[in-house]
Amino acid sequence: MPSSIDTIDTPALIVDVDRLEGNIARWAAFAREAGVKLRPHGKTHKCVEIARRQVSAGAVGLTLAKIGEAEVMARAGVRDIFLAYEVIGGPKLPRLISLAREIRLRVGVDSADGAGALARAAQGAGITLDVLIEVDTGLGRCGVRPGEALAALAQDVARLAGLRIAGIFTYRGYRSDLEAAGREEGEVMVREADRLRRAGIEIEEVSVGSTPTGRSAGRVGGVTEIRPGTYVFNDAMQVRWGSATPEECALVVLARVISRPSRDVAVLDAGSKALTAEHGPYSSRGESHGVIRGYPDCQIDRLWEEHGRVQLTTEARRLRVGDLVEIIPSHVCPTVNLAERLVCVRQGRVVETWAVAARAQVQ
Amino acid sequence: MPSSIDTIDTPALIVDVDRLEGNIARWAAFAREAGVKLRPHGKTHKCVEIARRQVSAGAVGLTLAKIGEAEVMARAGVRDIFLAYEVIGGPKLPRLISLAREIRLRVGVDSADGAGALARAAQGAGITLDVLIEVDTGLGRCGVRPGEALAALAQDVARLAGLRIAGIFTYRGYRSDLEAAGREEGEVMVREADRLRRAGIEIEEVSVGSTPTGRSAGRVGGVTEIRPGTYVFNDAMQVRWGSATPEECALVVLARVISRPSRDVAVLDAGSKALTAEHGPYSSRGESHGVIRGYPDCQIDRLWEEHGRVQLTTEARRLRVGDLVEIIPSHVCPTVNLAERLVCVRQGRVVETWAVAARAQVQ
């Protein structure tokens, strides 16, 4: 293994393990102090070494979306997983049942059709499957609306043999005022949980919050669990939203200048296949596909699959063909999903390589 | 292996092999008739079974970008590869040299610094490496401008022991009038080749053209080689540009409806991790992340990693939780890069599964 960063082939994903462990410890401490369970979303890292660190620091288990991801993490010793996702489709059910026999597994539901299929599969296998009902608190994706729609679905699900309602969950995503958005997210969900309880439905878990809203939502009394994901690495988007500092960014894409076609342009060997095409943050000059360490105002203005074009600031004109740059990605989760491995460094020295073991597990 | 499509787990990439073979045959026939070499870009499929079909149909070899991709294809028997990319960075050079000893390999250059490093590596290994100089015909990515810049770089490279100039190449990409754009691309490159020859530099290869511009560029006298990639599968973007018909789209993402949160919205289990977030084509209702077969006016208006949200047209409101849909992706190349395998069908029956063997080879 190369021991210093400039001997690593590019593009590569580099993790600063000290920063990573700092991020893991800070959120674990927050959850302890707030008295909520921390169930990190594993989609950010997809990496068993990081999952183990999260659980060691006090996480109750993981949140994931797909059965394939859960299978990888269960094999690595994670015994408590919540699939915050509607698991739909006959071919998936045998794997779901088999996993539910092995570990503590919970699954999202948001429709009577979906719940019915899960119930039939569980009943047929002679097990009871724990489900959490997804509530749409404003994102406009999956989930039922608070109030009557939620109450009606909860009554439907409660009648199904094979399922047990373990709670409710939501993912609200980002809003302009994170503090207020998180608080409202928590308050809506606690109010809905109470309403369901008054209707005779046992609600144990009230599960909310992502990296941007997790801290304020987690402080709302009655919330039992938060599910941040991005906090392990953070990214330029989180920095822009104010939910992380640049010093808390623990992952960069190491890339090399491969062309200097003009005075103000450099082309990097990291394009959408290394950085993802997902738009994220903004440098001071406008939209950029990531922030270059040391040159934060350079705009990565266009990505092709294998090329990233950089509009150079005056000071960055010194970059030559062959030079290395470190890019804080816009959105780190899909960036990690593209890579086979993470190169781990401490104080600038390579110490280890971790596989992105649950990468590409979309089923 | 499931034999009918509705038993396949979702999301999955489905290739209609008859359509694929039709596309391969049509472009091979075009190249034969136009009297140019066909060197398809393998980035679209990254799949050895498809590369072999292309070579069997008459392709001279493959175009690729990264050494890792070339290593995979060389192991699978492709003996003639052009890396249409600037290979920069010390850690890559031993692999490049070793591959150049094994197969007929050519590499792009666009700077004296880059060429110098290649020359030193080749000379040190006692080989001569064939290079093609990249010309920027208007894309604004890598490459030198036609005229003096090209002539100067060609003179520099010609002086380097260890390298041999085998020709020039360009990738122009899409312009509004494909026919005129391709013709101009070809004409500029033929003119530049002649100018270099008059200056005493031997130019054997004049390599141009992608799927949109390849046919018109390939008809220009003096062009020797075209490098289309997307044509094997095509996608919604190519259909929109007029370089393919919907019937020539050979790959779809099979997905399932997992939620029907309202009358006009369905959520699919295919998000940016299955479809890619890259924007592409447009349904008649505006921008969409892909076109749903049978419901071409439904707009996939937003993707998250594991969710695709669809704005339903009136007729599409019949879609229920659990239903399958087939999505023609916006841009098929990054879509394929996300998948581990392609499920191959003929007349709706599953016949085989192919690995996306060169997936994620970014180094």
Image (cartoon, coloured by chain):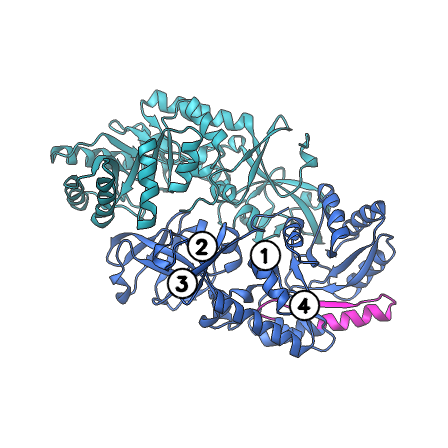
Chain colours: A blue, B cyan
Q: Are marks 2 and 3 in contact (CB under 8 Å)?
A: no
Nearest to the eye among marks 4 and 1: give it. 1
Q: Is residue B326 left or right of residue B174?
A: right
In this view, the residue in front, B41 or A250, is A250
Residue A93 x, y percent position in the rendering: 74, 45
Q: Is residue A337 left or right of residue A196?
A: left
Q: Which mark is residue A208?
A: 4
Q: Which mark is residue A275?
A: 2
Nearest to the eye among marks 1 and 3: give it. 3
Q: Earlier in the sequence, mark 4 or mark 1?
A: 1
Q: Residues within 10 Å of mark 3 (few under 14, many from 20)?
A: few
Q: Amino acid at mark 4?
A: Val
Quadrant in the rendering for residue B326: top right
Subunit of label 3:
A
Residue labelled with disc 1: A48
Q: Earlier in the sequence, mark 4 or mark 2?
A: 4
- Residue at 57%, 72% in the rendered image: A25
Highlighted range, magenta:
A188-213
